[in-house]
Image (spheres, rainbow, N blue to C red):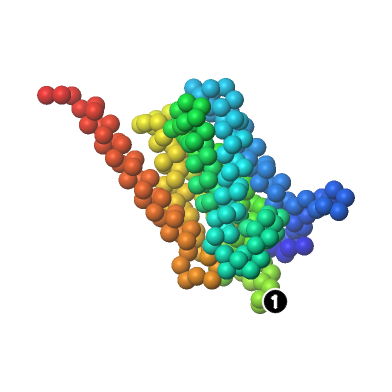
Amino acid sequence: MNTVNFPGLGIYLKLNRVAFSIGTREVYWYGLIIVAGILLAIVFGIYEARRAGLPKDSVVDTAIVAIPVGIICARLYFVFWNWSYYAQKPLEILNFRGGGLAIYGGIIGGTAAGYIYCRIKKMDYQKMFDVGAFGFLIGQAVGRWGNFVNAEAYGIQTRVPWRMEVFNNEMNSLISVHPTFLYESLWNIIGFIGLYLYRTKKKFEGEIFLLYVAWYGIGRAWIEQLRADSLPYSATFKISQIVAALTAIAALFIIAIKRKKLKKEEEPSV
């Protein structure tokens, strides 16, 4: 059982990370929450694909390819930045149930797989990426609640009114920390609402995806500064913060270039 309290809000909880058991096999809430996020993302993607004019079943077909690749890449990303541990225990690399998935690895791997699949099937990958951006936001917003159940992915110690109390094994006591899982979930929800309202006003195909990359990157760069468990654990720098900042800058730069080009094309010739 995990103790997760919000004393400033009068909320005190005992959370069991095991949802149920099938024989001797335990099924964790974390996995169920991740699956729920993926399913919600696919359902919304099917709806949005119709509006975007993408082929029937294109979202499901792309997801069947992109999601497994994304999960594998999320694991490899985590393993890479913790190689000093896995080099000593290589079989643990395959132990997904032991934890260790990094969202940026999943985003990179899933996007790359989706791009390749769309090119092979001769689909408009930019339209698909725009639809996929909403899926990423939904999946990430829901998935972070798996971290809540596991009492992980929390931040540095704080005394803010909405602070979260968790048990720290090293201190052998409860500590008050930033609920960074909640910050990221809310950031993604706000991003989803904003991009959903903007989607019919986008200037070019692929803009929604680029705005997602920029929005998530800005938020993650800020939230990562508050995280107490950033990758790599033993380093003084935070790799996800660097990746977040660089991808956000790159996305905003591409948007500026594309908009400038469109504006120039729309100007009447003299």
Residue toward you, 107 or 119: 119
Image mark count: 1
Q: Is residue 24 left or right of residue 152?
A: right
- Residue 231 on image: x %, y %: 53, 63
Work out whether 47 lies above or below 95: above
Quadrant of the rendered image containing residue 13: bottom right
Say few, some or many: other residues with alpha carbon within 10 Å of mark 1 (under 14 / 14 to 19 / 20 or more). few
Front-most of 160 and 48?
48
Q: Which one is nearer the viewer's eye here, 5 or 118?
A: 118
| 14 relative position to 179: left or right | right
> Left or right: 252 with respect to 39?
left
User: How far across and how far down the image is residue 242, in percent?
Assistant: 43, 59
| Residue 270 in view in this figure | yes
Above or below: residue 50 compared with residue 186 = above
As drawn, 44 above or below 91: above
Q: Amino acid at mark 1?
A: Asn
Q: Position of residue 46 (x, y in %)?
A: 58, 28
Residue annotated with mark 1: 172
